[in-house]
Amino acid sequence: MFASIVSYGLAVGAVYALIGITYNVMFSASRVFSFTAGMLGMLGGVLGALFIARMGLPVIVGLILVLVCGGVIGVVTEIVTVRPVLKSIEQHLYVLSTLAFALMVQQLAAIEWGTEAQPFPRLIPIEQGWLDQQFWLPMLACACTIAGLELLYRKTLIGRAFLAIAEDSYAARAIGLPETGLRLASFALAGMIGTLAGFTGAEMLLAYFGNQSILNFYGFVPVALGGMGSNRGAVVGGLALGLFQQAANFLVGGIFAAVAVFVVFIIVLLLRPEGLAGAAATRRV
Amino acid sequence: MPIKRRQVLSGSAAGAVTLASGLASPAIAANEPIKIGFMPALTGPSSSTGVGINRGTILAVDEINAAGGIDGRKIELIVRDTQSDPTKAVNAVAELMQRQKVNIIWGPLNSGEALAATPLVARDKVPMIHPCWVDELIDVKKYPMSFRIAPTNTQVGGGANYYVVDVLKLKKVAVISDTTGYGTASVNTYVPMLKAKGAEVVYTNHVDAANPDLKPELLRMQSAGAQVIMPWSVNAGFLSRICNTRGAMGWDVPIVGQTTLGSGQTKALLEKPEYWNKVYSNNFRQVCYADGKLPPRAQEYVERLKKAKIEFGDTLLWWVALGWDGAKMMADTFKTAGTKADDVVAYMNKVKGWPGVYGTVTWTPEQHNGFPDSEVVMCEVNSLKDGAFNLAPGYSA
């Protein structure tokens, strides 16, 4: 039982963490909380199964195509749903525009792909060892993503430009940084991370249009727990959520497991509204 | 089963041909075609059933018309695709009754649409036959002109319970469902029925169908001493996860439940083909193999279809047979009772032991559920051949 809680909890937690990072990457560049993260995760599974299982493409080509599609969808999200509402960001119109776009894509996926869960191919043709690939693939993807993002943000000029935009977009624009271009790039990057999460988690979650709402919500929990914009917080929050959810599945089971997760989530937010790793926001007066 | 556009088009085309041939009849009152308003879901999520039933209905109508129709009057099948959408079913049924002035409504073919359409049909006083399972759809006081040609949900659950308790002689049962309305309602109805039969329900729970790991639930069933798992869900992902988890645990208990357990979508999600062993789903005695043979009526029907080069590879025999039975029942009624609504209902109220391919139908003025309990059986899901399954082990032939 313990092994099952750990392997399953960490794997599903890694998927939640990656979706949380997807939220963060989009949020940092635009201050917009885009509800398209779960959609990207869902598409990672559905497009992966489409390219590899249905069209018979090699796994690596399928992965590249999925990431490219994710990037393109990220760019489209920015142009269609974020840019028009940025001027009135205080009104939180982006909640509507991003959610509507995500629901539209989900319905399209349901019509074209079908409403039944469908199988996702085994990505690496190896026997099931003590830890199956459906568990370690999302963990590996999560580790690579967080390492890659750390390198990007700390060691490269473009990464620092991302951080500058996130810190103060007005000042960044004043010193000549191309804010629009950087925002587009970060949405493309988020698109790739989101679809990577869905792709590597799909052996466990299957290629299913209904995964969108679960990923949207459970991917949001680590962001709220870890603090908005904090990728490390999202990873810690995601893994903790996965472990806790799986432990609750074993201990109470059924719908009560979901209730247990929500209860803990609400308690944490009541005690620390800024998130476990986030700093309390200060307001200039 | 994926629905190909071609199948849908061929179905609609056949309907259109029937329609055209009907319209070509001379417009003398006595020779006017008899109109059947048919409402299959040919597209959308409920369409695999609709396409199969549509095929059987069109076959029967074509055969009746080719043999000269009913006392010289052709049957005109007016088909409206409901697109698996209750709203569209409501619009279609209104159009069929008010503009097309059909003599009878055949359908809708799934309960969600029927729940929306049945009150309208009752209001307009048009006779109606449908094959939907939700119990509330038949009520001789509210809907005196509606008749069911298939089992009810209670009969379906009762058939599964009978198999577990009386045929397999298992007493400790685990009942699980997803969190949908269908899943929770089924568990709430079937668990008391199981207990009334003397079974001990050692585990019962509702689980989110998208939950990727059902091992905790199956471990809980195992530690409670369950001898059989009864899942109630139409979600192939959920059902396949139960089969996969049972297989991975090496737990050798039977799984007994709803027809989706035996669907192609469930099969596609199995990690190993052998995880489908000892899985038994609802089916119907008249269209199941017993000792490798179909019952005589179904056998004769299948041979006739094979001669006409009609294949079952992409659908199920019971769907096609159900479509066939619906059309034949209506034709028999019109032949004996004419087309006046009251006469049609009076005739159907006295139908007794009507020998369909799919089932034997008996209606009375007090009971419009026509399907006998004894013909609701369980089948081996991994035995599909020519669209039909083997009876589950333990039944006498």
Image: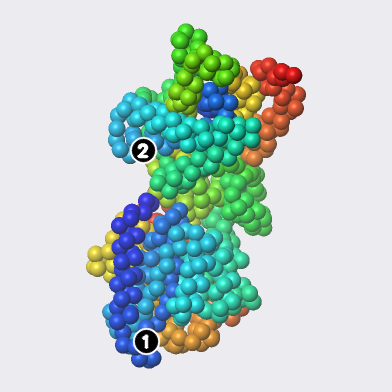
Identify the residue shown where x is 56% and y is 80%.
B125
In the rendered image of this protein, does residue A25 appear above or below residue B48? Answer: above
Q: Please, which chain is the residue tagged with disc 1 on? A: B
**For the point 38% across and 59% down, which residue is it?**
B316
- The front one of B304 and A205 is A205
Quick check: do tags 2 and 1 share a chain?
no
Q: Is there any visible trace of residue B374 in the rendered image?
A: no
Give the structural element (helix, strand or loop) at label 2: helix
Tag of residue A50: 2
* Residue topped by disc 1: B32
Residue closer to the observer: A194 or B224: A194
Q: Secondary structure at mark 1?
A: loop
- Pick the residue in front: B239 or A177: A177
Residue A104 badge = none
Spatial CA span between label 2 and label 1? 51 Å
In the image, what residue type sits under mark 2? Leu
Task: Using a 10 Å C-alpha cutoff, classify the residue at mark 1 as few (fewer than 14 neighbours), some (14 to 19) or many (20 or more).
Answer: some
How far across and down, in percent of the image, does residue A261 sit?
A: 66, 32
In this view, B11 is above or below B379: below
Q: Quadrant of residue A284?
A: top right
Residue at left 75%, top 24%?
A271
Packing grade of label 2 (10 A; few <14, some 14-19, many >=20) is many
Give residue B395's position: percent from left, percent from top: 47, 59
